Amino acid sequence: MQHPQPFKRRSRRLYAFFCALGLILALLGAQVPLQVGFAFDLPRNQALYVPMSDGTKIALDLWLPADLKPDARIPTVMRMTRYWRSFGLVDLPMESDPNYGDARRWNEAGYALVIVDGRGSGASFGTRPHPWSEREIEDYAEIVEWIARQPWSNGKVGSFGISYEGNATELLAARHPEPLKAIAVQFNNFDPYTQLAFPGGVFNEWFVRQWSDGNQVLDANDRSFICVIQKLTGESCEAAKAVVTGVKPVDEDADGELLKAAIAERRENLNVYEAAKDITYRDDPFGDRGDTLVDFSPYHFREEISKSGIPIFARASWFDAGTARGALSRFFTYDNPQTVTIGAWNHGGNFDSNPYNPPRHSVDPPFSEQLDELMAFFDAYLQDDAETTPPPSEIRYYTVGADEWKRSTVWPPEGVAMRSWYLAPDGGLSPEAPTGDRAADPYAVDFAATTGTDNRWHTQAGGKDVVYGDRADADRHLLTYTSPPLTEDVEITGDPAITLYLSSTATDGAFYAYLEDVDEGDRVTYLSEGQLRALHRQISSETPPYRIFGPYHSFEREAGMPLKPGEVTKVSFSLFPISVLLKKGHRLRVAIAGHDADTFARYPTSGHPTLTIRRDRRYASKIELPVRGF
């Protein structure tokens, strides 16, 4: 990082603070890398209102190369956000804009960069009846057409984004504006119900509340969130608020009156948390308009997106909510050319989250190389003189433990077969099916059990590293089953699935299964998990709306099945996909829980239920693992 030109005294003291401002957007899922650079070849930046067909003004930032010649025609990449496209800054040069480094990178590669405040957020007018509303996505399609009409445009546009922005990009492809030639969806949620908000039908209460509260603060243009998030108090807080005015206004709004008018409309925005609390089933309404989560899930538009033929670049992680599952389902659902990369990262890909590596380990590949891959993808489809061959459709995935990148066009990959391991006496896990009668293990649900606050779900609200650490102490709150030491290395690549025969003293509950690796020193390493709310345990015989791996639960109201206390019931569900090499001498472990206190809602809401897990020849509870070479 180069040193800045001299600031005023107070601004100089705050320079280090502004280097951290990128984390503020990241906390709310925006994941905008802050790469503040200073040079004399400053790109031109304009902040504009573009009126939509319904008259609503949408704010955007346009970054053009500083040396753009009048007769040049260049492609454009676009990113759409609901987390403020940029900050309003006082007495700081344009180079301090948090998007400057990103813009400079794209501009120097021959691209225009457009960053859009979604309708009802940032400096844009309008309201948000729910995330990714039909009108919001239509706005983005109109902006694509607007870009193509500009005198500097070559008529080709690519859209990209992480998290919320990735979903906006994928939904934009369903509209298929003609200038849109390629999209990149990174760490987004193909099915927001099962892969983030309600995995297994279990309410991810921590994330939804965090996300909802943060968005409300942003929508009020409240500068105090800087102090709260950065833990600034007193003079430091006041100094920060004196330099950051809130969201960046457009250039024409010199007196701030337009921004005030836009913010006043936010009172009609949906409170996401309050709306989500009323959801149990996939087909329950989200808000008061009658829309469901299905209505703005990318998979719901599978026919439109496939018909578009738009090439897709996708990136996901084994340890980032359900993004890897979504990337795999998308690959086998759409007909579009697709390049899928699944690594061992946090939400956003700037931290290594390989559980076998120490914290702060270098990212593989480095974040700069990830950006190069993204740019190379767009080069193949947007540059008029592109010499890059479009990449083949394939899945590139990382095997933790082996530290190897591999490729496949099928899933699970060739050579992988499902193998059963059965819950056994004395907390054992055995490849042999049980032969005894009426064997069972009681488990009084421990509602203090947790996977912590650095897990695969918390990274979605800020992009911090995923660090489970040694799970040995946590497992003392759980019911565990552990295999003998492995006699050879074993690779697990695919989607594990668990079948439990159990009874409960309650009519509702949530069942969690964790796949873990226990080394020779008894250190327990988290590998994957799955969960299922008891109400959703019915396995559907209907055709799924997209490619799934393992038992299919519709999560619809008509399939709801309360438990009958004391009655043995079958519960089958998938764990999130993983690729891992377990070393000879290590042991497999399956851990069973009834709650994750720092993340999910409690079921039942009161009482102290006991689960009884059966493991006999009639009720042979087991986990099926996709194994290679064992």
Image (tube, rainbow, N blue to C red):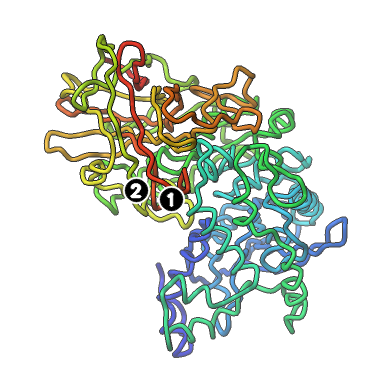
Tell me the element at label 2: loop
Q: Earlier in the sequence, mark 1 or mark 2?
A: 2
Q: Please name the residue shown 52% across and 44% down the image.
A: 196
Say which residue label 2 marks: 450
Position in image of residue 213 (x %, y %) = 56, 63
Judged from this view, the residue extending furthest toward the left is: 521
Q: Alpha-carbon distance for marks 1 and 2?
A: 8 Å
Give percent across and percent down for residue 52: 83, 58
Q: Between 114 and 40, which is closer to the camera in this rendering?
A: 114
Label 2 neighbour load within 10 Å: few <14, some 14-19, many 20+:
many
Q: Residue at x 74, y 84 (%)?
A: 255
Amino acid type at image mark 2: Thr
Question: Is residue 120 placed above or below 109 in the rendered structure?
Answer: below
**Quarter of the rendering containing residue 491:** top left
Quarter the C terminus occupies:
top left
In the foreground, 408 or 457: 457
Image coordinates of residue 197 in percent, x first then y, are 55, 45
Q: Disc 1 vs disc 2: Cβ atoms closer than 8 Å?
A: yes
Total of numbered circles in the picture?
2
In the rendered structure, the answer to whether residue 365 lies left or right of residue 490 reads right
Disc number placed over residue 599 in the picture, else none? 1
Query: Horizontal and vertical percent for residue 23?
Result: 46, 64
Amino acid type shown at disc 1: Thr
